[in-house]
């Protein structure tokens, strides 16, 4: 049996999707199921659709193409602002596209006309996280100006992204700011717009019934696939965290010093490692590394184990305090964080097993 491997529990993901879809429906919110963590995995996408999620979103156009080619029904939302070089395919494969640059929107407009396709645009607004989007103070006028130039593509609404780059949390204040911009634009344009304002980090506003009226769309991936909220640093209590399990095989067991001997420089990743002197410890090496996972995102099912460090191909785990007699060829199982799962799905060296 090949290792390392990622065990994907489709039923647990389905139950998470069912709960979140119901929660969003009850609050008049369109849930976009985000598949980017899984590289647009068709099996997982099909589970999300079966749970009632109508629209799927991904930041990579190749993933959306994969879903289309595997007969997964749309519509599809392209989450990352598309490159000029991929706009033709973006129009062909995506139904809703997030944009912030006028130049990009105008080229989409011309291509949409060429294909006679009703492409929907979500104009992204930066309310403080400093990732993509028109700065909120300039957004109303820039969007009005763009609207006058568009001939075929349609501005469906405005959106924002929080908790990804700057770690700025979704709050009542920044959500209300989006609603104010929407209300102003609706009055000037004499048309209804949506606000795509939520991701996993914004679920707490729904849970606490603090989400301002007018936020229409949530784009959610992490909560569906892991049952966690990395920005809020929490396991979401009403969702399952038993969706993904990473298994890695032991290739060495030995007692060694807890502190390296010799002059300390940088490790293979360019970092200066720090070690606590605990004397000699029993440790194992796993045949998995930073090319496949984030070591600080590994949480062993054996709570006595401590993940120490990793290079590109090896992960070192302290097993001294465990009552299990681990040996070469044995397998250690881990729950994983969002960042860790992102690498595991991306790595071709991690086998994907569906249950």
Image: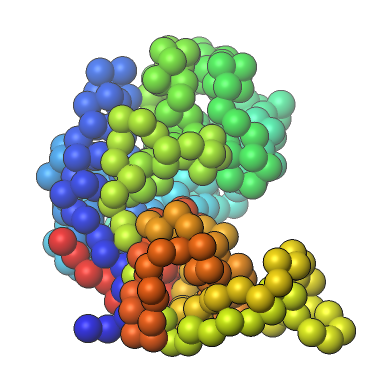
The one nearer the camera, 311 or 173, is 311
Side (left or right) of 277 relative to 186: right
The one nearer the camera, 72 or 353, is 353
Q: x and y percent of residue 234 in the render?
A: 48, 37
Side (left or right) of 240 relative to 275: left
Q: Residue at x 61, y 74 (%)?
A: 281
Q: Is residue 123 visible?
A: no
203 up-or-down from 214: above or below: below
Q: Name the quadrant of the C terminus.
A: bottom left
Q: Name the quadrant of the N terminus.
A: bottom left
Q: x and y percent of residue 209 in the render?
A: 41, 13
The one nearer the camera, 88 or 172, is 172
Q: Is residue 158 visible?
A: yes
The one nearer the camera, 94 or 71, is 71
Q: x and y percent of residue 61 in the render?
A: 39, 63
241 up-or-down from 298: above or below: above
Q: x and y percent of residue 337 in the render?
A: 46, 54
Extreme-right residue of the structure: 263
Q: How is the image coloured?
A: rainbow
| Count of residue discs | 0
Q: Residue at x 42, y 42 (%)?
A: 228
Q: Residue at x 32, y 60 (%)?
A: 245
Q: Residue at x 40, y 46 (%)?
A: 222
346 up-or-down from 172: above or below: below
């Amino acid at each position: 049996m090949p290792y390392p491997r990622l065990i994907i529990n489709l039923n647990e993901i389905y139950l998470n999707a069912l709960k979140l879809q119901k929660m969003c429906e009850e609050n008049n919110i369109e849930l976009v199921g985000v598949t980017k963590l899984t590289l647009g995995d068709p099996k997982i996408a099909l589970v999300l659709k079966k749970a009632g999620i109508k629209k799927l979103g991904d930041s990579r156009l190749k993933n959306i193409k994969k879903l289309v080619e595997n007969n997964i029904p749309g519509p599809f939302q392209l989450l990352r602002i598309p490159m000029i070089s991929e706009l033709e395919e973006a129009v062909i494969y995506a139904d809703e596209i997030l944009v912030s640059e006028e130049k990009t929107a105008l080229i989409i407009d011309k291509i949409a006309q060429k294909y006679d396709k009703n492409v929907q645009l979500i104009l992204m607004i930066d309310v403080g996280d400093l990732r993509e989007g028109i700065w909120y103070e300039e957004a109303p006028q820039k969007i009005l100006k763009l609207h006058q130039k568009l001939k075929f593509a349609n501005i469906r609404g405005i959106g924002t992204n929080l908790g990804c780059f700057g770690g700025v949390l979704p709050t009542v204040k920044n959500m209300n700011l989006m609603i104010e911009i929407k209300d102003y634009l609706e009055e000037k344009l004499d048309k209804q717009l949506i606000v795509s304002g939520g991701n996993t980090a914004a679920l707490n506003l729904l849970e606490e019934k603090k989400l301002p009226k007018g936020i229409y769309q949530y784009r959610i991936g992490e909560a569906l696939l892991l049952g966690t909220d990395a920005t809020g640093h929490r396991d979401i209590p009403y969702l399952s965290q038993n969706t993904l399990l990473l298994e890695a095989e032991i290739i060495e067991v030995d007692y060694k010093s807890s502190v390296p001997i010799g002059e300390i420089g940088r490790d293979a990743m360019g970092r200066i490692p720090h070690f606590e002197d605990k004397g000699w410890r029993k440790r194992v090496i796993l045949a998995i590394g930073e090319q496949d996972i984030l070591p600080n995102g590994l949480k062993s099912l054996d709570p006595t184990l401590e993940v120490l460090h990793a290079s590109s191909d090896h992960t070192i785990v302290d097993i001294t305090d465990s009552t299990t007699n681990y040996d070469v060829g044995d397998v250690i199982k881990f729950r994983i964080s969002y960042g860790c799962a992102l690498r595991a799905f991306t790595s071709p060296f991690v086998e994907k097993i569906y249950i």
